[in-house]
Image (tube, rainbow, N blue to C red):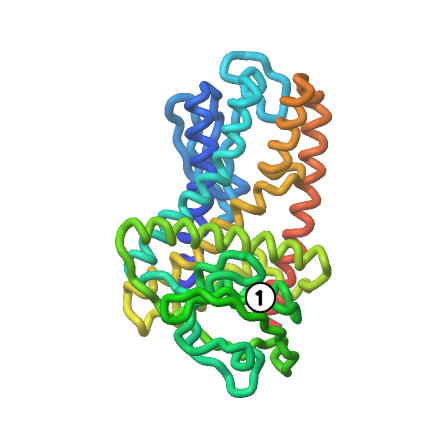
Amino acid sequence: MKILIALLVFSVIIIIHELGHFLLAKMNGITVLEFSLGMGPRLIGFEKGGTQYSLKLLPFGGSCMMLGEDGDEQEEGAFGTKSVWARMSVIAAGPLFNFLLAFVLSVFIIGNIGYDPAVILGVSEGMPAQEAGLREGDLITRMNGKKIRLYREFSNYALFHPGEPVVFEYVHDGKTYETKVTPVLTENGYKYGISGSVNYRQRTNVIETLKYSAYEVRYWIDTTLQSLKLLLKGGVELDDMSGPVGVVDAIGDTYEESKSEGTLYIWLNLMNIAILLTANLGVMNLLPIPALDGGRLLFLIIEAIRRKRMEPELEAKIHFTGLMLLMALMVVVMFNDVKKIFF
């Protein structure tokens, strides 16, 4: 059951991503040869309107194969015959649909249980936050000028900026104040002496729900980017990374842990994981790496500037090389996932 739930979550995220490419391709008159879920040999499929719709053996990935996407075909409906701006819209649509899915899921979650305001629920005796004048009930609004709207943004700031002195802007009894806090190193890392909780939720009206749903998406995009920076700086090890196997295991564990709380909380927790995954997929696909949407967008931006397309054969070779390197990385990460689960 755990695996089926995990595959369902993966499938929805992938279908939405590929649906973005598919819809914009159709809108721009590009022939879609195949729209598929999964990779490898085709299990079942049917053809309609010149497009083959397929379900494939391996339950990871998916594709929206367009005529002439990696070639120089000049027949009607070929990808390369459309304007550079039309092609950009098709490529960008996948990641944008991932962010749209994250927003829709956020609306459902926040509409049901509210958002997590950055409210201080406790201040530890003798710690820097108390000495700086912060008190229980204060609402943190900025940290070193960065706008804070969710408690998780506060907790992540310490993770991504360990040991840095922070100028807190906060609201106390309806008035705004500023104070500087320098965290101290404890056995659990750098701490301000502030406690709060993501489970402390505040319900709100429809307009505020939409607004905080957008903040939720922005939070996950920012967290993904900050994590990538940490990775490049060497602050993340291989054991901290997860691929499809690790994510399936995490989704399964979340499902099992949520069963005692009832059906609603099972779905809310699964949606929360789906928001993380779909926002992460959207960001990762926009990275300027060959074979990813971001890499293809980079070539199209260069084409728009030069007003001349790069040799399609050369571009295809570059994307193929990027794909092979990404597949190699995926194998390494999947092996590490299996090792963590069974050993």
x, y (%) of residue 234? Answer: 72, 61
Establish if 72 lies above or below 315: above
Image quarter (top left, top right, bottom left or bottom right) of the N terminus: bottom left
- Which is nearer the eye, 45 or 246? 246
- Which is nearer the eye, 192 or 223? 192
Q: Residue at x 48, y 81 (%)?
A: 123
x, y (%) of residue 121? Answer: 41, 77
Establish if 297 lies above or below 15: above
Q: Residue at x 45, y 28 (%)?
A: 24
Establish if 261 lies above or below 241: below
Q: Residue at x 37, y 71 (%)?
A: 173
Please identify the quarter of the rendering in which residue 161 is found.
bottom right
Query: Is any atom of residue 133 visible in this view?
Result: yes
- Which is nearer the eye, 214 or 130? 130
Query: Is any atom of residue 151 visible in this view?
Result: no
x, y (%) of residue 324? Answer: 69, 42
Please identify the quarter of the rendering in which residue 157 is found.
bottom right
At label 1, the amino acid type is Val
x, y (%) of residue 195? Answer: 47, 77
Query: Would residue 36 appear left or right of 323 to someone viewing this image?
Result: left
How many numbered circles are shown? 1
Query: Would residue 286 appear left or right of 289 to someone viewing this image?
Result: left
